Image: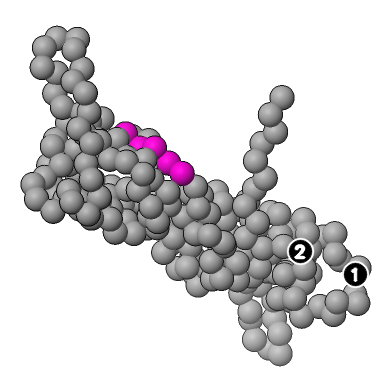
Amino acid sequence: MPTAPAPTAFTTGPQVKQYLRIPVTNTDDDGLLRSLADVANMAIAKSLLRNVLSASYTETRNGTGTPTLMLLNTPVTAVASVSIVGPLAQPNVIPPPVSLIQGVDYAVTPYSLKLYNGRWPRGIANVIVEYTAGYASIPADLGHVAAKVAALRYRELERLGQKSKIIAQENITFDLSEFPPDVEGILDRYRTGMGISDELAGTQ
């Protein structure tokens, strides 16, 4: 029976420990920090709804009727093939796809394919793109926010169930949201590339 792929390791227990400035010689909570790193990794992966590491994709898309075809996975690093399936010439007879040539028919950007001339013909599932997209390694800012999320969960253990606390006669309210605003801001930048859609959204 095949095993499920390992979750993306945005951060690790030792990285969370370093973020918290816990001395390396203090190993009391090493197991807990590893668990919190795993939880943070899963929460961020669920929030992003995408694979940020480099992988190969085949997308069958709807032609947009515009010069630009946005791709669902970013950043695009290589395109293996692009083909367009024409309308049925006669009932139940599918015409052979027309292959396009990069640098001659279209240009590649980190998010899209742009035709030099003309428009992607409107149609249902009539454009097929094979390409590679993603980062060679976890971006530093994603690793940083993952470590921060795990560190925040670690600190929350000191005040389980508390929404606020009076410190030096000042009422301090704790942020109980899943991600603080600065973390949300960074995650949102990585969500944006995946969320871009065409006038006619394609199917994967």
Q: Is residue 133 above or below residue 145?
A: above
Q: Is residue 123 above or below residue 94?
A: below
Q: Is residue 120 above or below residue 90?
A: below
| Residue 59, quarter of picture | top left
Measuring from the top left, give residue 65's x and y in whole percent: 12, 42
Taking the spot 22% from the left edge, 28% from the top edge, the residue there is 97
Q: Residues within 10 Å of mark 1 (few under 14, many from 20)?
A: few
Residue 57 located within the stretch drawn in magenta? yes
The mark found on residue 13 in the picture is 2
Measuring from the top left, give residue 107's x and y in whole percent: 23, 55
Q: Secondary structure at mark 1?
A: loop
**The N terminus is located in which quarter?**
top right
Q: Disc 1 marks which residue?
A: 27
* Residue 117, visible in the rendered structure: yes
Q: Residues within 10 Å of mark 2 (few under 14, many from 20)?
A: many
Q: Which residues are magenta?
A: 56-60
Q: Depth check: 52 or 179 in front?
A: 52
Q: Amino acid at mark 1?
A: Thr
Taking the spot 19% from the left edge, 38% from the top edge, the residue there is 63
Q: Depth check: 196 or 113 in front?
A: 113
Residue 72 located within the stretch drawn in magenta? no
